[in-house]
Amino acid sequence: GEDVEQSLFLSVREGDSSVINCTYTDSSSTYLYWYKQEPGAGLQLLTYIFSNMDMKQDQRLTVLLNKKDKHLSLRIADTQTGDSAIYFCAEAYNNNDMRFGAGTRLTVKP
Amino acid sequence: EAGVAQSPRYKIIEKRQSVAFWCNPISGHATLYWYQQILGQGPKLLIQFQNNGVVDDSQLPKDRFSAERLKGVDSTLKIQPAKLEDSAVYLCASSPGGNQPQHFGDGTRLSIL
């Protein structure tokens, strides 16, 4: 069946770039999303990309989409300690239902 | 703009008891979603409402879970009776509709003893 997969952990040094990768399987997905979750909080929408685009940049965030390989990535430039959180990739399908990955825990070391 | 409001923030009950969660979506958002997030996993959709009608409840365990959105605004999610495996965070999200992004509340953390 369809699934969204992400690596579970990523550790970087403060000031470095972080790249979080995601693969999805539903080729009919319309939008792909990145959400951030801090401890005890809900999901915060970071950015999203329409499936007919291949790149979107928003300040420190760059999203790359390779639709042929069903691969999505989120690059965070100049990563800060406040970026430490769990990052979820999600695909929208059907009536804007969303399917989430298990999340990537980003740890930023000073 | 006020965000999605959920209450309570935490709930502890014993198995076989009943529990209800409440959600108030962002003003004007026609679509409302309930998700279950088990520790260490991503959120899993339980039910989607468009105004006061159900769009998708295919993943809602209907033998014990129920949800309603009677006036097309607030929504309640109920579990009766609760099982140990229902321990999770229950997240509510809303969107204006169509392909607009979903915005999440802070969730209700449910612990079953």
Image (tube, coloured by chain):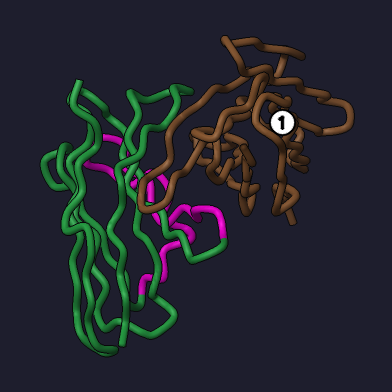
Chain colours: A brown, B green
Residue at the spot 69% in from the left edge and 20% down from the top edge: A63
Using a 10 Å C-alpha cutoff, classify the residue at mark 1 as few (fewer than 14 neighbours), some (14 to 19) or many (20 or more). Answer: many
From this view, report whether residue A4 is shown above or below residue B84: above
Residue at the spot 70% in from the left edge and 54% down from the top edge: A8
Residue B66 as seen in the image, left or right of residue B87? left
Q: Quadrant of the N terminus of chain B?
A: top left
Quadrant assignment, res B36: bottom left
From this view, report whether residue A1 is shown above or below residue A65: below
Q: Which residues are magenta?
A: B41-62
Most foreground residue, A36 or A25:
A36
Q: Where residue B93 sits in the image (x, y, percent)?
A: 34, 40
Q: Where residue A10 sits in the image (x, y, percent)?
A: 72, 45
Residue B40 as seen in the image, left or right of residue A23? left
From this view, report whether residue A66 is shown above or below residue B53: above
- The residue that label 1 is drawn on is A18
> Any magenta on residue A13?
no
Q: Where residue A15 sits in the image (x, y, percent)?
A: 67, 24
Check disc 1 and give the amino acid type.
Ser
